[in-house]
Image: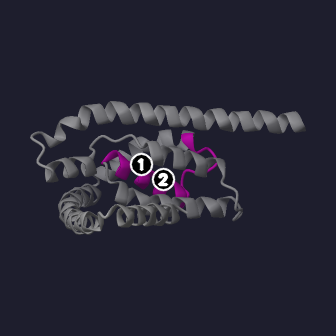
């Protein structure tokens, strides 16, 4: 659906430029935008490779295992429907860990794998389970300790202190995560009350 919206906006922009006689500016913007996008991607790749390398070192050294063990009690309470030793729990912990490091691109595949495993637990129903909804809320709000991607973007655009946003990012994402969990629980218990009302 999103790609239809983007195609519509692009089409409207080009048609408007044709009627206003500004097609030259549109062509220039397309090529300069593409050039900037490539430069930005290369900048992001270098930072992503660095942090993924750090995560691999942490995994090999056992530090990541210690970190995920520390997160496990909280994850078990947040996802009571999932058995603690189920593969879905491992993917959830990997997703949360990657998000904490600001590696959204690395977190996404883990989130998809977690949802696939949770779907099996949910008897392959098309309706999202409680755990799926909680994971989506957590993944979207995602408490971030090191905003890797944003730091990389700031570095690419010549920021004097690209890492100065770390403190405010931690506060903002902590608030968004708390809000996401509160809303998730509110609607879950509201749905439970409605079901009890019908029975």
State yes or no: residue 81 in magenta.
yes
Contact between marks 2 and 1 (CB within 8 A): the answer is: yes
SS assignment at label 1: helix
Residue 66 on image: x %, y %: 34, 47
Quarter of the image that includes the N terminus: bottom right
Report the span colored magenta.
78-101
Residue 163 on image: x %, y %: 17, 40
SS assignment at label 2: helix
At 51% from the left and 54% from the top, the residue drawn is: 89
Q: Main secondary structure of the magenta part?
A: helix
Q: Residue reaching furthest right?
A: 199
At 29% from the left and 65% from the top, the residue drawn is: 26
Q: In the image, 39: left or right of 84?
A: left
Q: Which mark is residue 96?
A: 1
Which one is nearer the viewer's eye here, 18 or 31? 18
Q: In the image, 122: left or right of 91?
A: right
Which one is nearer the viewer's eye here, 187 or 93? 187
Task: Check disc 1: other Cα within 10 Å, few if <14, some if 14-19, many if 20+.
Answer: many
At 34% from the left and 42% from the top, the residue drawn is: 144
Q: Quadrant of residue 9?
A: bottom left
The answer to whether residue 13 is above or below residue 139 is below
Q: In the image, 18: left or right of 153?
A: right
Q: Which mark is residue 92?
A: 2
Residue 44 on image: x %, y %: 22, 59
User: CA separation, marks 2 and 1?
Assistant: 6 Å
At 31% from the left and 64% from the top, the residue drawn is: 21
């Amino acid at each position: 659906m999103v790609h239809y919206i983007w195609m519509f906006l692009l089409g409207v922009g080009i048609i408007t430029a044709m009627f206003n006689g500004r097609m030259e500016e549109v062509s220039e913007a397309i090529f300069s935008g593409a050039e900037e996008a490539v430069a930005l991607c290369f900048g992001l790749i270098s930072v992503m490779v660095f942090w993924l390398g750090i995560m691999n070192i942490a995994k090999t050294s056992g530090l990541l295992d210690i970190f995920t063990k520390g997160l496990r009690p909280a994850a078990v309470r947040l996802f009571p429907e999932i058995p603690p030793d189920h593969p879905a729990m491992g993917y959830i912990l990997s997703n949360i860990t990657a998000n904490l490091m600001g590696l959204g691109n690395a977190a996404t595949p883990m989130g998809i794998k977690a949802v696939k495993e949770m779907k099996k637990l949910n008897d392959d129903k098309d309706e999202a389970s409680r755990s799926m909804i909680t994971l989506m809320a957590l993944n979207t709000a995602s408490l971030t300790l090191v905003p890797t991607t944003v730091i990389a973007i700031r570095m690419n655009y010549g920021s004097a202190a690209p890492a100065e946003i770390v403190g405010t990012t931690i506060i903002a994402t902590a608030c968004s995560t708390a809000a996401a969990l509160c809303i998730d629980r509110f609607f879950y218990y509201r749905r439970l009350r409605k079901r009890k009302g019908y029975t």
